[in-house]
């Protein structure tokens, strides 16, 4: 028998021995009266080797993270959701029967402990156990280094273990919850109404992305998991709701990377009688206020690179960025043939019917994006790549649109909305006609959305902000998988499962 199987066997033998003693391995009756966080300040006024006056009794529950046994006494550390507390277990205090039960404990067990507080000779607040309860017997060992997992894929695949043993991971997800709470609070405080739109749609729209397809048996129709809620949120503008938002899950059948997961979270919101310029101001204020609340400063570091989120943020048109940052001669950008030639020289492959606007956008993505470290709004995107955005009245070849970039990645996309149903139909039809082999462009036009526009939609601006990428920025996380609790991964092979089954040791 190899060492890993031996550990599993030993744990099961301990569980069987406890059951034979009449111990309920998965008790449901222990209710802790206290949290660790509540107890820790009580040690501030105690001297080493001093017990708390009055011998008040406390009860806590949590997971055993360390064990040190010394014959008739032992120390362990117990962790709950709020912190970690040392427990002192003494045979004379517990009694022979309970101490025998304790000796079958393992690192990873979830237990309940009742007792009194004192401070050890070394000055650590501890709970002297008077009674113990087994709440959940752990049949698998925690990783050998219980303070953290070093194998990245195991952290993502077994997030439940990662959260047990990696404090930094727990803190990242607490921060994510706080960021989403602050986003929702900001939108509520600014008069936006939170709504819910369909996650299964007959026609995917609102973005250019390959959708996931499913089939509804009762209706006998194909449906698509939404790639964006945009077209439904704008239907609500038609219906008279003038400020709406949704914190939504989107699904896109695309590749995986440090920035992409097939299932991700967006904030999407729409405001009637506003322009994209209004949303630039709102976005700047919202993200800066959230960063200040979460991190206490607007001068942050992302993966070792300083980032300054102090408003006002830089604003450039796409062509200005190509000139100032990529160093392209303005004369080249003014000549379609030279733009296409430059794109070819840079290895960019374009569809046969792609226009100069598409070529400029590809050059921007290749040559500029990664250099935008401090927050930068890029405006005036070509109409060709912005089928839902309002044309600029002075220059109809570009739209009233911006994308926000921080640390070289897109954080937000917004524009003044197109509310002309005739123009919208023409752009949809042109996009479909030029689709070619591009699976990200859906071949069916959303007739109901056009019908909604024909009833009249007020002038408006709308925006999507990537929540996962925002959390990555504010939590200094290198990969989107670090901020999604259960990211998508390739299936495990049977060999991988065996390798990871007992990647730990006994304490």
Image: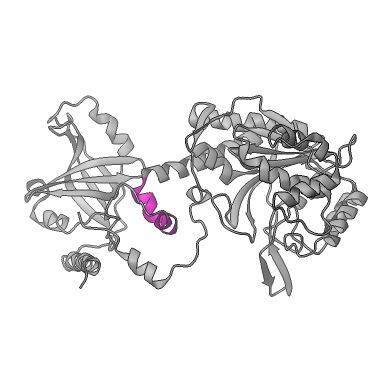
Task: Pick the residue in front: 437 or 495.
Answer: 437
Residue at screen point 57% across, 55% down: 261
Q: Residue furthest right?
A: 422
Q: Does the magenta-highlighted stretch encompass residue 96?
A: no
The region drawn magenta spans 153-166
Image quarter where the N terminus lies is bottom left
- Is residue 107 shown left or right of residue 69? right
Task: Pick the residue in front: 468 or 106.
Answer: 468
| Image coordinates for residue 222, horizontal then vertical, percent | 72, 70
| Image coordinates for residue 194, horizontal then vertical, percent | 67, 43
| Image coordinates for residue 156, horizontal then vertical, percent | 44, 55
Asked whether residue 482 appears in the rendered view, the answer is yes
Image quarter where the C terminus lies is bottom left
Residue at screen point 19% across, 26% down: 46
Task: Pick the residue in front: 367 or 503.
Answer: 367
Residue at screen point 14% across, 34% down: 120
Q: Is residue 217 above or below residue 344?
A: below
């Amino acid at each position: 028998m190899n060492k890993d199987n031996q550990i599993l066997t030993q744990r099961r033998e301990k569980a069987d021995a406890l059951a034979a003693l009449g111990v309920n391995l998965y008790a449901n009756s222990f209710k802790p009266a206290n949290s660790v966080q509540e107890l820790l300040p009580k040690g501030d006024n105690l001297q080493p080797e001093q017990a708390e006056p009055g011998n008040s009794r406390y009860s806590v529950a949590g997971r055993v993270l360390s064990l040190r046994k010394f014959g008739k006494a032992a120390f362990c550390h117990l962790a709950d959701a709020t912190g970690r507390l040392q427990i002192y277990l003494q045979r004379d205090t517990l009694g022979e029967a309970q101490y025998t039960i304790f000796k079958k404990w393992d690192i990873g067990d979830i237990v309940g402990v009742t007792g009194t507080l004192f401070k050890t000779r070394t000055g650590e607040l501890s709970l002297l156990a008077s009674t113990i309860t087994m709440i959940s017997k752990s049949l698998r060992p925690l990783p050998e280094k219980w303070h953290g997992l070093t194998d990245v894929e195991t952290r993502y695949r077994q997030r439940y273990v990662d959260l047990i043993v990696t404090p930094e991971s727990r803190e990242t997800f607490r921060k994510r919850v706080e960021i989403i709470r602050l986003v929702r609070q900001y939108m509520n405080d600014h008069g936006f109404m939170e709504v819910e739109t369909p996650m299964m749609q007959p026609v995917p729209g609102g973005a250019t992305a390959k959708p996931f397809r499913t089939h509804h048996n009762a209706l006998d129709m194909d449906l698509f998991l939404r790639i964006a809620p945009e077209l439904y949120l704008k239907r609500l503008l038609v219906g008279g709701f003038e400020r709406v938002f949704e914190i939504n899950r989107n699904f896109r059948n695309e590749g995986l990377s440090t920035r992409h997961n097939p299932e991700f979270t967006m904030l999407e919101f729409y405001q009637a009688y506003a322009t994209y310029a209004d949303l630039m101001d709102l976005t700047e204020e919202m993200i800066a206020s959230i960063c200040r609340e979460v991190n206490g400063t607007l001068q942050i570091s992302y993966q070792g690179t300083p980032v300054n989120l102090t408003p006002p943020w830089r604003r450039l048109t796409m062509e200005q960025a190509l000139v100032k940052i990529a160093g392209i001669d303005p004369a080249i950008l003014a000549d379609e043939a030279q733009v296409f030639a430059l794109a070819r020289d840079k290895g960019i492959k374009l569809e046969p019917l792609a226009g100069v606007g598409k070529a400029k956008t590809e050059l921007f993505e290749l040559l500029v994006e990664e250099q935008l470290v401090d927050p930068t709004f890029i405006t005036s995107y070509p109409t060709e790549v912005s089928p839902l955005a309002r044309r600029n009245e002075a220059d109809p070849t570009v739209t009233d649109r911006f994308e926000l970039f921080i640390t070289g990645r897109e954080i937000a996309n917004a524009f003044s909305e197109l509310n002309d149903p005739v123009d919208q139909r023409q752009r949809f039809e042109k996009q479909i006609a030029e689709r070619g082999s591009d699976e990200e462009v859906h071949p069916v036009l959303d007739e109901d959305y056009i019908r909604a526009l024909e009833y009249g939609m007020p002038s408006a601006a709308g925006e999507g902000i990537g929540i996962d990428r925002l959390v990555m920025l504010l939590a200094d996380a290198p990969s989107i998988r670090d901020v999604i609790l259960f990211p998508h991964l390739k299936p495990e092979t049977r060999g991988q499962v065996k390798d990871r089954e007992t990647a730990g040791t006994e304490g």
